[in-house]
Amino acid sequence: MMQLQIKAVENYLKGLYGSSKVTKIGELGGIPVEVDEGIKGFGYGKPYLIEFEAGGKAYSVVLSSMRVQKGFGHDHFSDRAQILIWQNSVFNNLPDHVKSLDVGYFTHDGELYSSGKAEEYFILMEKIEGKEYFIDLERIKKDGELTSLDRDRTLALSSYLAQIHANKHDDRELYFRKIRDLVGHGECIMGLLDSYPDNLDFVSQDDLCAIEKKCVDWRYKIKGNTQRLCMTHGDFHPWNIMFRDGADFTVLDRSRGEWGEAADDVSSITMNYLFYSLQKYGELKGPFKQMFDLFFDNYLEKTGDMELLKVIQPFYVFRSVVVASPIWYPNLDHAVRTKIFNFINNILDREEFDYKNVNSYL
C-alpha cells in the first residue's frame, strides 16, 4: 500500500494534457471523492477513477495497475510491466475495445511517469574491463594445455556459484515456474527445439518430440523440490564472464529470474567444458576433463549438494540443445552434434548424473 499523491497525479497528467487539476478520485465502482492531498491505502491491482480538468475541459480516466501476485507468470515486476506495455500497444487496434491513453510506472516515491511513447527499451550499464572466458577455452582447445591459471579460474567460478547458491529463498511458486520455464519457455527447451530446421541429418522431428516428452516427465519428477530455490545467475556461460588479472572476474547478463535452481548455473558452465572437449577430442578428455572434474569436485565439496546430480539432467538438455543448434553453431561437426544428442538421451534415462563418467553418455 502507498499514498497516491494528487500532486504526483497532476504532474503526470500535465505531460499528457497540459496543466491539469484533479477534482475527484476514488476506486472504480465506488463514489469518487474530492481530495486535496492524496489517497491513503492506494493499492496495486485496484482501478481508480480520476476526474480532472485540463484546457477548460473535464475528463474522466481510469488508472489501473496489476496486483502483485505469485504464480500465473506474474511473479516478477518485469512480468507485470510486459503485460501492461502490451495492453497499451494493442487495446486501440481492436474495434469496440476500451481505449488505452498511456502506459506508465510508479517510482518508489509515488511519482508517476509515462512510458507510452516507447518503441523499444534499453539498459545503461557500467563499463567492465576484461576478456570473455571463452577466449581461455579457445586457447585450451588449440594448445591442449591446462595452466595453473586455468585451474585457479575454474575453482573461482565453482566457488562463486557455491557462494551465491547458498542464498536460499522460500517461494514455492517461483520454483515451480523455474522448472516449468525450463521446459516450456520460448528461450529454453521447447523454444530452442522449435528453432531447429526440419529434415536435419543428425536428429529427426520424432526424436525432438521424444526428448520433449521426457523433459515433461522430468518436470513432474523434480518440481516438488521447492526447498532448492536459491539465488542464481541464470545464464552462466563463458561469454557472460569477464576475467581480468588472475582469477578476478565480473559476470554479465543474468537471466530469467533472480531465484532458480542451482543446476541451471552448474550445467551452463560445465556444458561448455564438454562442448569444447568434443570439438577437440570427440569426448571429455585432457584439460577439459580436468576442468570439468575440478569444477564439480570443488562445488560439491563446498555445498554438499549431492541432490544436484538428481535434478541436473533436464538442465543439461537445455544447454545441450543450445550448443548443438544449427542456428547458433552452423559450422559444428556432424559427429559432435550426434554425440550431444546421445548425451541428451542417455542422461534423461538416468536417475543420477555420474559426472566422473560423462563419456559413458556419449
Image (tube, grey):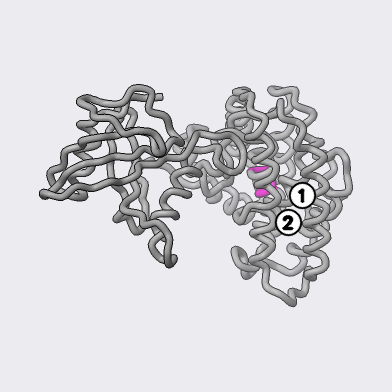
Identify the image quadrant of residue 151. Answer: top right
Disc 1 crowd rating (10 Å Cα; few below 14, some 14-19, many 20+) is many
Magenta region, residue range? 269-273
Distance of label 2 from label 1 (alpha carbons): 6 Å
Q: Which residue is mark 2?
A: 278
**Which quarter of the image is occupied by the C terminus?**
bottom right
Residue at x 64%, y 43% (from the top left corner) = 269
Q: Which residue is mark 1?
A: 284
Residues tagged 2 and 1 counted as in contact (Cβ below 8 A):
yes
* Residue 271 belongs to the span the image colors magenta: yes
Disc 2 crowd rating (10 Å Cα; few below 14, some 14-19, many 20+) is many
Please give the label number shown on residue 36.
none
Q: Does the rendering let one see residue 40?
A: yes
* Residue 262 belongs to the span the image colors magenta: no
Residue at x 67%, y 65% (from the top left corner) = 194
Q: Secondary structure at mark 2?
A: helix
Secondary structure that dominates the magenta span: helix
Q: Residue furthest bottom?
A: 199
Residue at x 36%, y 57% (from the top left corner) = 99
Q: Is residue 213 or residue 251 the one in the foreground? A: 213
In the rendered structure, which amino acid carries the disc numbered 2?
A: Leu
